Image (tube, rainbow, N blue to C red):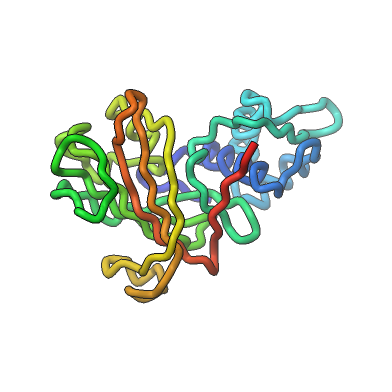
Amino acid sequence: MTQTQGSLPIYQQITELLIRDIAAGRLIDGERLPPERDMADEMGIAVGTLRKALAELQNRGMLERVQGSGNYIRAVSDPKSLYAMFRLELIAGGGLPTAEVLSVDRVVKDPGLPGFGLSPEGHRIRRLRRLSGQITAVEEIWLDGSYAETIAREDLSESLYLYYRTRLGLRIVRAEDQVGLGAVPDWAPAAFTLEAGTPVPLITRISWAQDGARAETSWTWFDHRVARYVARLK
């Protein structure tokens, strides 16, 4: 596992991957994990990096370390994942989300968007999404222009919500998704493999800030051969 510019530290990537595996049922409550050295070898990381990730899971109450026995999963209802609002999973379940920023532009809002924010302009962020390295989706996120004058592409992290919180003082506290049918946009890169105009599932999201304002909307076109949309009710 490698770390690229703007990505989360590797131990945090591992933590988020394990959290998503727990949510998907690939790791179940009470399950004993393999020995740490075996896990580290399988993931291609150092044992110390894995231990840091497991310590983070333990701090969140999702791992019990039993001396002389091993590490055991403890499922919790709210793991506080950076990707708690990311609803795409691999067909087999789980998968670590990563994002490749394709472009960032401040432009007049697309009239096809749901209404949001006070500014006539928005920051349009286009990204290619992967789950555990598999190309999964293309997305177009629109942040209301009132939250920042400019957004530099190189400043964006894997998690936009983390960027919003740490750089803009903006917290996304809830979102509404509508899932329907769309068509691959003409700006999708060749790596997405599906040609422009191909019918695919489309997620339209409206997101609210801590003050109750509609701060962001987005469109996500995903490859149903690779991923599925999952919302778990508790």
x and y, in percent, of residue 112 in the image = 24, 55
Query: Percent from the top left, x then y, of residue 95?
Result: 57, 52
Up-down: is 95 above or below 155? below
Q: Residue 167 occupies which quadrant of the picture?
A: top left
4 in relation to 225, above or below? above
Q: Nearer the viewer, residue 205 or 185?
A: 205
| Residue 12 falls left or right of residue 40 | left
Taking the image as shown, residue 24 lies to the left or right of residue 219, namely: right
Residue 79 at x, y percent in the picture: 60, 31
> Looking at this view, is 171 or 111 the one in front?
111
Residue for point 22% across, 42% down: 152
Number of marks: 0
Where does residue 196 sit, x and y in percent of width and height? 32, 73
* Residue at 38%, 65% in the rendered image: 182
From the viewer's side, name the closer residue of 8 and 24. 24
Q: In this view, does 219 lie above or below 195?
A: above
Q: Quarter of the image containing the C terminus?
A: top right
Q: Please report the residue visible at 63 percent of the width from the left and 54 percent of the height from the top.
A: 93
Query: What residue appears at the point 60 percent right and 28 percent down from the top-left corner?
Result: 56
